Amino acid sequence: MMMRRLLVSTLAAVIAGATFSVVLTQTTPATAERRGQAPLLIGHRGASAHRPEHTLMSYEAAIAMGADYIEPDLVSTKDHVLVARHENEISGTTDVAAHPEFADRRTTKTVDGRPVTGWFTEDFTLAELKTLRAKERVPDLRPDNTAFDGLPEIPTFEEVVKLALERGVGVYPETKHPTYFDSIGLSLEEPLLDVLNRYRVRKAYIQSFETANLRELRGKTRLPLIQLITSGGAPYDWIASGSTRTYDDMVKSDGLREVAQYAAGIGVDTKRVLPVDAAGKTTQPTTLVADAHRKRLDVHVWTVRNENSQLPADYRLGNPASPVYQRATGDVMGYLSKLIEQGIDGAFCDDPSMGRAVIAKTSA
C-alpha cells in the first residue's frame, strides 16, 4: 500500500508539473498579511478549476497560484476523523461505486430534511476511505480535470492543515451538515478544534451555513467565524427548530447585528452583492457590503468561477451556439473586478491564478 501511494503521488506530481509548470513555479504564495490592502483570495476547494476538488493536489495548486487561504469542506468518518469532501455522500467525487467490497453500503439517508442515496463517509473508517480515489465531480464542465481521476486520495483535515502550515497559508474549513452529524454522534466541532489547537493554527476562519454550531464555537475558540448565507432559503438548524426566519432576514440590519454577536464576517452568495434579473444579467449592486461593514462584519463572496455557465449572462463570452460555450471561459476577471469595486473583503475563487491577477491589478 505504501508503494502504491508513493507511485500515485509521484505520477500526480509529474502530471501536475507538466500541465502547470509555468504557473506553479513562478508564483509566490500570498499570505494573510495582504488583507488590509486587498481582498483575501480563498482557493475554493483548492484550485477546483484545475484539479479535482478537495484533494491535496488541488490545495497545492491553489497555494502555488497565490491563494491566501485554502478551503476544505469537512465531514466525518465512522471512526470520527474529519476528511475533506464537499458532501458526506461520495459517489460523485470518488470511485466508491467501482469497489465491489463496498457495494452493500449504498443506502438512502435523510440529510438536512432531504433523502439522499449513495455511499456516505460516516459508514466508512478512515482506513477504508483511504482505499478510494478521488475523481472530478463535474466532468462535463471540467473535462480536463478527469485526467487526474483515480490518482489522489481523500485527505484528512489534519493533512490539509499540515500542508497549509508548511506553505505559510491559512485554512478556511467549513463544517458540513453539523446538525445531521450531531444527530448521529459524530459532532464536527470537537475534532475540528482538536486539530487546529494541536497544530497551533492561528491563520484560519471557520465557516458554516448553520448558526447554532457557530455560536457554540464562539465560546471555544478565538479564531474568526464566518456565517455563510445563500441567495435564498434558511439555515437548516432554524428550519429544524420550527423557526420561520430566513437568510433574507439575516442580511437585514437586525439580522446582521445578531450575526455580529458571534461571527467576524459573513460569506455570501455573489448574488447578494450583485443581484441578477430574470435574464440572468447583473443589476444594481445591493448595500449589503456597506451594511455589514457598519456592523463590523467582513464580507467574503462565493463563488467566482471561470465558466460561462457559472457567470451572470452579461459576463459570458463567445458564441452561444458553440458546443463548448457553457464551459468556455467568460469575462471572469471583469466580474471579480466588479465585486471588488463593491468593497468586499475576500472572494472564493475556483481559479486562484485568475483571482490573484485581478486582485493585483485592482490593488496596484
Image: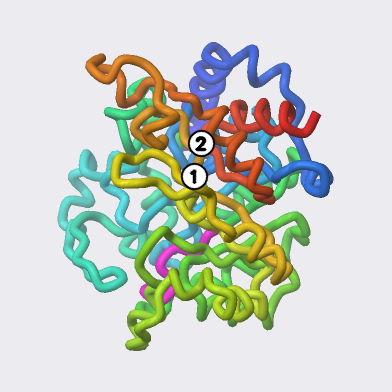
89 on left or right of 307: left
Which percent across, then down, holds residue 101? 21, 48
Q: Which of the pair 128/80 is nearer the observer? A: 80
Q: Does the magenta portion include 49?
A: no
Residue furthest out toward the bottom:
242
275 on left or right of 345: left
Q: Which of the pair 141/25 is nearer the observer? A: 141
Label annotation for residue 303: 1
State how far apart marks 2 and 1 are (Cα). 7 Å
Which region is colored magenta?
Answer: 174-181
What residue would you read off at disc 2? 350
Q: Are marks 2 and 1 in contact (CB under 8 Å)?
A: yes
Q: Is residue 27 above or below residue 172?
A: above
Which corner quadrant of the image does residue 94 belong to? top left
Q: Which of the pair 167/285 is nearer the observer? A: 285
Which percent across, then down, holds residue 286? 54, 55
Instruction: Indicate the amino acid at tag 2.
Output: Asp
